[in-house]
């Protein structure tokens, strides 16, 4: 049944008045579908995002670095769970979403299809990728859907640690030996442009943007967020003596913004559609991890069944 | 209050698809005597593991001194349709508020 125009009007008035939409509230079917799509992609990204960094846990250069990275990757698992839990409030089961991911039918942020070649990549990910995620998620913390917004608030509190541990890695490498400095700059060169792509296509080319904005799911446009990220990052790069790989980068006194060069959207499209450097590897790693964890899930079920049976027996003997 | 979850099987599933396990709503009590607050939910086979999952997912940085986990199916919630009639009795009784009562000019009551 199509949504009644009156109901949609009333719904949009609530959004305009700044009210939060809660799980049991009436919502247009499209709103629900858009949220399920967006939130599940976000949750998948948190989960797949553990893979490039997980690669480096055993190879972290010091115990301090290993502790930090381990805690960060654990946080990302938590982020995935917060958002899956929020998505379930829209009437879809997490198992179904996970199945879609494992079957290769779900999208996730294409940034995670790039390889982590050196330790410096871990620094660049924390600095750029988590830095970009903070800009995006701070905006989403004001999303009109309550469970999504609340998950974002929780996540934002944790992201600052992610960014700072990455930035510290980069600062340390940049001030280190020539070889350390070289891998730091190399990581910056490889991660900068994909990080700018994380904000998605320009709003005028983004099919979902208008609707998401009208319904208060997104409060700012992709371009505005990207610009904010660039403005924040330029000074951080200068401070640790690393160069962002963009010859067009210059301060625009008129707008106060840092002007940056054109983004290679063909590359973006290729990676989104599965032709990134590591799309297949990431999926295979995720499938392996899920399979390898099966015994834990089976053991939990067996343990619960055993305890339930024991409790049952106690109850029966007490009744006898 | 608690986010409503439509998919909440009542009994323990026997497959490895952990998403099919029962859903538990998680409430955290922050330090220093603040009231419990809803944090989110976890899937778990039983109450004990729900508690452990809740700690790992929602309390990694001293966010809580106490955790409650409640089977989602055990929560009875008001519905949005009720909102008017259900809460009206609280809204049309101004005499429940201090401003309803007048005091002599210049007197400090609190
Ligand atoms: Fe995250
Ligand atoms: Fe993060």
Image (cartoon, rainbow, N blue to C red):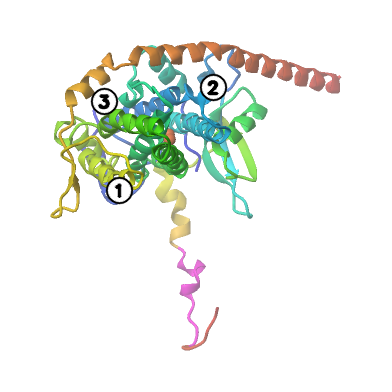
**Does the numbered disc 3 mark a residue whose Cβ is under 8 Å from ligand 1?**
no
Kind of element beneath mark 3: loop
Q: CA distance from mark 1 to mark 3?
A: 53 Å
Q: Nearer the viewer, mark 2 or mark 3?
A: 2
Provide residue A300's location: percent of width, then percent of height: 64, 18
Indicate which disc, 1 or 3, sits on the residue closer to the N terminus: 3
- The residue carrying pointer 3 sits among few (fewer than 14), some (14 to 19) or many (20 or more) residues within 10 Å by Cα, namely few
Label 2, on which residue? B9
Label 3, on which residue? A1
Q: Does the image show residue A292?
A: yes
Do the residues marked 1 and 2 share a common chain? Answer: no
Q: Chain of mark 1?
A: A
Provide residue B34's location: percent of width, then percent of height: 60, 53
- The residue carrying pointer 2 sits among few (fewer than 14), some (14 to 19) or many (20 or more) residues within 10 Å by Cα, namely some
Q: Nearer the viewer, mark 1 or mark 3?
A: 1
Do the residues marked 2 and 3 share a common chain? Answer: no
Q: Chain of mark 2?
A: B
The residue nearer to you, when weighing B61 against A38, is B61
Tell me the magenta residue range. Answer: B93-104
The residue nearer to you, when weighing A294 against A200, is A200
Provide residue A70's location: percent of width, then percent of height: 53, 30
Label 1, on which residue? A235
Kind of element beneath mark 1: helix
Provide residue B41's location: percent of width, then percent of height: 52, 33
The residue nearer to you, when weighing A2 against B32, is B32
Kind of element beneath mark 2: loop
């Amino acid at each position: 049944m199509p949504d009644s125009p009156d109901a949609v009007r009333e719904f949009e008035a609530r959004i305009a008045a700044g009210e939060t939409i809660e799980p049991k509230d009436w919502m247009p079917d499209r709103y629900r579908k858009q949220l399920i799509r967006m939130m599940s992609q976000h949750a998948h990204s948190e989960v797949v995002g553990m893979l490039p960094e997980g690669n480096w846990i055993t190879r972290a250069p010091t115990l301090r670095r290993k502790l930090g990275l381990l805690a960060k990757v654990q946080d990302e698992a938590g982020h995935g769970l917060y958002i899956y839990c929020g998505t379930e409030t829209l009437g879809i089961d997490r198992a179904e979403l996970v199945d879609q991911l494992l079957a290769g039918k779900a999208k996730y942020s294409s940034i995670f299809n790039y390889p982590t070649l050196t330790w410096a990549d871990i620094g660049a990910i924390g600095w750029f990728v988590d830095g970009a995620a903070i800009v995006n998620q701070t905006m989403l913390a004001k999303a009109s859907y309550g469970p999504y917004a609340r998950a974002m608030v929780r996540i934002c509190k944790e992201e600052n640690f992610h960014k700072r541990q990455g930035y510290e890695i980069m600062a340390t490498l940049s001030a280190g030996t020539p070889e350390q400095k070289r891998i730091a700059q190399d990581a910056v060169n490889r991660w900068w442009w994909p990080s700018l792509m994380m904000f998605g296509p320009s709003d005028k080319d983004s099919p979902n943007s208008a609707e998401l904005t009208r319904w208060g799911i997104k409060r700012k446009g992709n371009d505005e967020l990207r610009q904010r990220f660039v403005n924040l990052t330029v000074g951080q790069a200068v401070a640790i003596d690393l160069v962002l790989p963009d010859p067009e980068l210059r301060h625009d006194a008129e707008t106060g913004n840092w002007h940056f060069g054109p983004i290679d959207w063909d590359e973006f499209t290729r990676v989104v559609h599965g032709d990134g450097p590591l799309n297949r590897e990431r999926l295979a790693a995720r499938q392996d991890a899920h399979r390898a964890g099966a015994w834990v899930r089976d053991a939990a079920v067996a343990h619960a069944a055993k305890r339930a049976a024991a409790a049952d027996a106690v109850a029966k003997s007490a009744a006898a | 209050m608690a986010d409503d979850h439509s998919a909440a099987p009542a009994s323990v599933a026997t497959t490895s698809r952990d998403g099919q396990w029962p859903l538990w709503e998680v409430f955290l009590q922050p330090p220093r005597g603040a009231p419990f607050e809803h944090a989110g939910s976890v899937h778990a086979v039983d109450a004990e593991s729900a508690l452990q999952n809740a700690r790992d997912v929602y309390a990694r940085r001293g966010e809580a001194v106490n955790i409650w986990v409640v089977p989602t199916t055990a929560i009875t919630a008001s519905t949005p349709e009720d909102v008017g009639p259900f809460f009206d009795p609280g809204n049309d009784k101004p005499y429940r508020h201090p401003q309803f009562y007048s005091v002599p000019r210049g007197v400090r009551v609190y």
